[in-house]
Image (cartoon, helix red, strand yellow):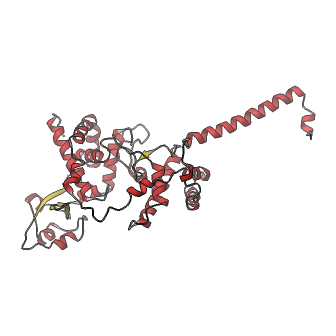
Amino acid sequence: MIAFPFFRTVPPRLLVALLLIAVGAGTAGASSAKDLKARRIKVPQAAEQESAYASRPEAMRFADDLASRRDLDVQWVREAIGHARYSPTIVRLMQPPAKTFTKNWRVYRSRFIDPVRIAAGVRFWQENQAALARAEKEYGVPPEIIVGIIGVETIYGRDTGKFRVLDALATLSFDFPATHPRARERSEFFRGELEQFLSMQSRLDSDPLAPRGSYAGAMGMPQFMPSSWVKHAVDFDGDGKVDLWDSPADVIGSVASYFKAFNWQPGMPTHYPVRFDAATLDMNALMAPDILPTFSVAGFTAKGAVLEVDAQNHTGPLALIELLNGGGAPVYVAGTENFYAITRYNWSSYYAMAVIELGQSVAQAYTAAGKKP
């Protein structure tokens, strides 16, 4: 045994005390570091390590690059992504619909405009009427649009998703289905969302394995993607934090903030009824811009669209919105810039119309219950 000079000069009783202190300090330091890691990344005992991303070189390169660009702890980022699990269910759900799929507005509508959502929407409006009124005053977005969004997305918080957000974003970042026509573009999008999510979790000192959401990684009552949370979520209840799971006020303010960022025009209708003049109708020209408002009222009517009086006084651009009904006759409306703003939440005219009609149905029921919107 090698004896060091320092220990030769220390009395035995003091030497024992010093050794006990050193051992205790080392144990406490290790315990503290371990507790910090456990507090930030809590790995379930039954984690499926064989399907994790720790062994994927491209995932670890992404982790290193992310940590460097965002000035994050590289070991924490590697550990977080390494514990993300590949989900074949998410890959299947992200596949494009079969070629035999036929769009049907009536069927789609029936999924969202029903007695359960309407009743839940009335309760939500009654419980949060002050926040809804303040959101309209500050952002210009009417309550029925906000209520329609939250109802369509999660039935007012009843169903916010069961997938681990980290698993969803990692799966779609590194294993987006190659058969999708926009696979490369979508994979890059989800890598950006994964970066935003991990940056946010690190900043908040939150466990990245804890949040659960949709199979696409959307979170909370309004189903915000991480980038939308970072850019548009607001602390509308003034408690010093943004909570889109359990604070209806924050949810209401954040949805309104989102729409304002996408150029919501206060007081403008979302759409108008439209008919056609068979003698002058140029349907191909009217459909060419899709849902992007492009035509002036004069240009719209010159191509065979017939508008009612109030629509004829509209000053902004219009788009012809087509809602197919399977083998039945399609539904057509003239969409405004506000209709287009709703499609920025979900890029679908069917979605936008469902939000509008659910909000209208809830507003009617709310009024019937004795509360004026």
Of residue 314 and residue 335, the one placed in the foreground of this image is 335
In the displayed structure, 57 sits above or below 197; it is: below
Give the residue drawn at x 18%, y 46%. Answer: 360
| Residue lying at the far front of the rendered structure | 100
Image coordinates of residue 84 in percent, x first then y, are 52, 51
Q: How many marks?
A: 0
In the rendered structure, the answer to whether residue 8 lies left or right of residue 26 reads: right
Residue 315 showing in the rendered view: yes
Residue 268 showing in the rendered view: no
In the displayed structure, 4 sits above or below 88; it is: above
Of residue 127 and residue 39, the one placed in the foreground of this image is 39
- The image quadrant that residue 282 belongs to is bottom left
Q: Quadrant of the C terminus?
A: top left
Image coordinates of residue 339 in percent, x first then y, are 23, 57
- The image quadrant that residue 66 belongs to is bottom right
Image coordinates of residue 26 in percent, x first then y, are 73, 37
Of residue 179 and residue 183, the one placed in the foreground of this image is 179
In the rendered structure, the answer to whether residue 287 lies left or right of residue 25 reads: left
Image coordinates of residue 105 in percent, x first then y, are 20, 56
Give the residue drawn at x 73%, y 34%. Answer: 25
Q: Quadrant of the N terminus?
A: top right
In the rendered structure, the answer to whether residue 42 lies left or right of residue 16 reads: left
